[in-house]
Image (cartoon, rainbow, N blue to C red):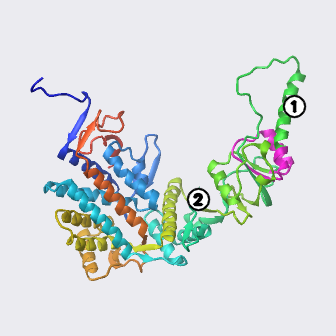
């Protein structure tokens, strides 16, 4: 065996080592970042995503784009996780986080070509990220929870560029009112926003400007019987998760009958079963029933005779939200139902929109519904994504209590302060800190590019303004001028920026630390595709390639 190579991997295995592995990973990660860069900012462009089933999504929401894309590369999926983490933790800023991660890796690639070891780059990036988070806190402006204009500015900034610009004043007012309704003051004087008590419903065929805030829940259903009252002011409401139908045998059975009387006897027994279920509902004192499952035609008739308004096949999400609105539970067994399971409230009907409005009377019950309207499904879907992000960042701002000037102002200021900090860092890590500062300036550059402005001139002017001490100066992409973006109402939550910096740096460091890729087959995560590892972003063939 002397002199013969020892084979320890299978024939189908692939291995990429050292510099090739780093280039492979960086290329894959940058491909993901480049895919969403053009969506950044108020002037960002939209992406049309077509699924394998033919479903069309038109959006510029970073996390939605990355989740819908058919990405087939393990490194690229690590960058997608950055967007998902940013969405979960901060509610917005997904495109910023992914774009910064891509730029960090691009700058790291330049340092690697200068023979700087990945460990030194990672250490420098960690130092820079920690310093950046400290500087965010230093620059951040404290928020007064009663400052409605500031909270609304945060919501408007988040929604701008997501199909809601024309009606952002109306929508930001709705968002503020919704958050105000479900905010709770903690013992230490802080504010906690219970976002679970805010529901968002959409309707097509109407203008966005007709969107409204409803106190309570909106259920898009009809009464199960024409003879039922559609409105009940003094409502006694039962939430039911049991079918009001004849119970069927679990096993297949057959019955032989000798006469019509026997058949009638079976039918009478079924009718008695339904009568008993309706009587159980009536015995609780309920005059309104929202049932998650089916209601038999015969049962509908008896419910109408008892004067009970019933709705069947209510969505699970609606039932869960009604538990908050009414401060009650869901009955899963009618045999155990009692008056204690019934909640008081009011039920009104909007026949034009075919909606039930449900409001609870209990002091402990609280919940609001934002009813978004738009001309088409694509419009209201994108509007819903924008409003959901705005709700998240507004709630986060109230809880965190800090905001930052937007329009690229904070990124340029952080970059300037990081370059000053780099002078105190010894060794090759200093170059990594400076590379981190350069990566942050990607945000104002891309904002300018997406607005059709000269990115270099814009960045030079921004640097000059910040070196003169104007730390709130950013880019107004609508006019192309530099201005105090905080005073102009372009405001971002500090927590979202801190999270973006943290997620981007940790993802970049994770990719840089890999110097060897060993795969049992091809380097794709979907073995059904033929993408393989061919090309720098190996395995990103199918879905990714088609969208970029």
- Magenta span of residues: 279-308
Residue at far right of view = 261
User: Residue at horizontal 76%, vertical 37%?
Assistant: 245
Residue 268 placement: quadrant: top right
Residue 359 placement (x, y as % from top left): 71, 62
123 magenta-colored = no
* 63, 425: nearer the viewer: 425
In what element is the residue under mark 2?
helix
Q: Nearer the viewer, residue 42 or 315?
A: 315
Q: Are marks 1 and 2 in contact (CB under 8 Å)?
A: no
Residue 297 shown in magenta: yes
The residue depicted at 62 percent of the width and 51 percent of the height is: 317
Place of residue 492 in the rendered image (x, y in percent of width and height, measured from the top left): 42, 70
Pointer 1 local density, CA inside 10 Å: few below 14, some 14–19, many at least 20:
few
Image coordinates of residue 522 in percent, x first then y, are: 29, 35
Q: Residues within 10 Å of mark 2 (few under 14, many from 20)?
A: few
- Residue 382 against residue 458 in the figure, above or below: above
Mark 1 or mark 2: which is in front?
A: 2
Q: Is residue 317 above or below residue 487?
A: above
Q: Residue at x 66, y 51 (%)?
A: 319
Give the numbered dot on residue 196: 2
Q: Give the Cα separation between the discs numbered 1 and 2.
A: 45 Å
46 vs 452, left or right, is right
Which badge, 1 or 2, is on the more N-terminal residue?
2
- SS at circle 1: helix
Residue 239: x percent and y percent? Answer: 72, 50
Q: Which residue is mark 1?
A: 268
């Amino acid at each position: 065996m002397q002199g013969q190579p020892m084979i320890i991997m299978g024939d189908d295995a692939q291995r990429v080592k050292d510099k090739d592995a780093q280039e492979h990973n960086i290329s894959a990660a940058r491909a993901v970042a480049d895919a969403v860069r053009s969506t950044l900012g108020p002037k960002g462009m939209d992406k049309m995503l077509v699924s394998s089933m033919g479903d069309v999504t038109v959006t510029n929401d970073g996390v939605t784009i990355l989740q819908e894309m058919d990405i087939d590369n393990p490194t690229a999926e690590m960058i997608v996780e950055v967007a998902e983490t940013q969405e979960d933790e901060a509610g917005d800023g997904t495109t910023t986080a992914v774009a910064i991660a891509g730029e960090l890796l691009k700058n790291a690639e330049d340092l690697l070509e200068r023979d700087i070891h990945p460990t030194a780059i990672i250490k420098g990036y960690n130092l820079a990220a920690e310093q950046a988070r400290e500087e965010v806190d230093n620059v951040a402006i404290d928020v007064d929870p009663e400052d409605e204009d500031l909270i609304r500015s945060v919501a408007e900034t988040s929604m701008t560029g997501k199909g809601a610009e024309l009606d952002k004043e109306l929508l930001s007012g709705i968002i503020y009112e919704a958050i105000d309704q479900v905010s709770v003051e903690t013992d230490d004087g802080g504010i906690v926003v219970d976002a679970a008590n805010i529901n968002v419903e959409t309707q097509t065929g109407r203008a966005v400007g007709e969107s409204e805030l409803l106190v309570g829940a909106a259920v898009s259903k009809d009464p199960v019987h024409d003879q039922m009252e559609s409105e009940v002011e003094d409502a006694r409401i039962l939430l039911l998760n049991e079918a009001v139908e004849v119970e069927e045998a679990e096993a297949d059975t057959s019955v032989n009958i000798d006469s019509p009387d026997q058949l009638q006897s079976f039918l009478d027994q079924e009718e008695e079963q339904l009568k008993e279920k309706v009587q159980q509902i009536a015995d609780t004192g309920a005059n309104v029933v929202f049932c998650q499952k089916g209601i038999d035609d015969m049962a509908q008739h008896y419910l109408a005779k008892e004067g009970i308004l019933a709705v069947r096949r209510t969505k699970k999400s609606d039932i869960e939200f009604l538990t908050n609105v009414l401060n009650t539970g869901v009955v899963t067994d009618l045999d155990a139902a009692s008056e204690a399971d019934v909640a008081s409230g009011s039920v009104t009907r909007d026949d034009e929109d075919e909606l039930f409005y449900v409001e609870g009377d209990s002091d402990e019950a609280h919940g609001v519904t934002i009813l978004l309207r738009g001309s088409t499904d694509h419009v209201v879907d994108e509007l819903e994504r924008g409003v959901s992000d705005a709700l998240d960042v507004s709630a986060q701002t109230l809880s965190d209590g800090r905001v930052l000037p937007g329009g690229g102002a904070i990124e340029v200021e952080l970059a300037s302060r990081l370059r000053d900090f780099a002078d105190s860092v010894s060794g090759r890590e200093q170059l990594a800190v400076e590379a981190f500062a350069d990566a942050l300036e990607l945000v104002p550059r891309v904002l300018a590019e997406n607005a059709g402005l000269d990115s270099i001139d814009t960045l030079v002017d921004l640097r000059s303004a910040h070196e003169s001490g104007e730390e709130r100066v950013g880019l107004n992409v609508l006019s192309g001028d530099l201005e105090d973006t905080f005073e102009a109402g372009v405001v971002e939550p500090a927590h979202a920026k801190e999270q973006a910096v943290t997620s981007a740096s940790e993802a970049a460091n994770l990719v840089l630390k890999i110097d060897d890729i060993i795969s049992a087959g091809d380097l794709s995560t979907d073995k059904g595709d033929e993408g393989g590892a061919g090309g720098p972003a190996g395995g990103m063939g199918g879905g990714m390639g088609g969208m970029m």
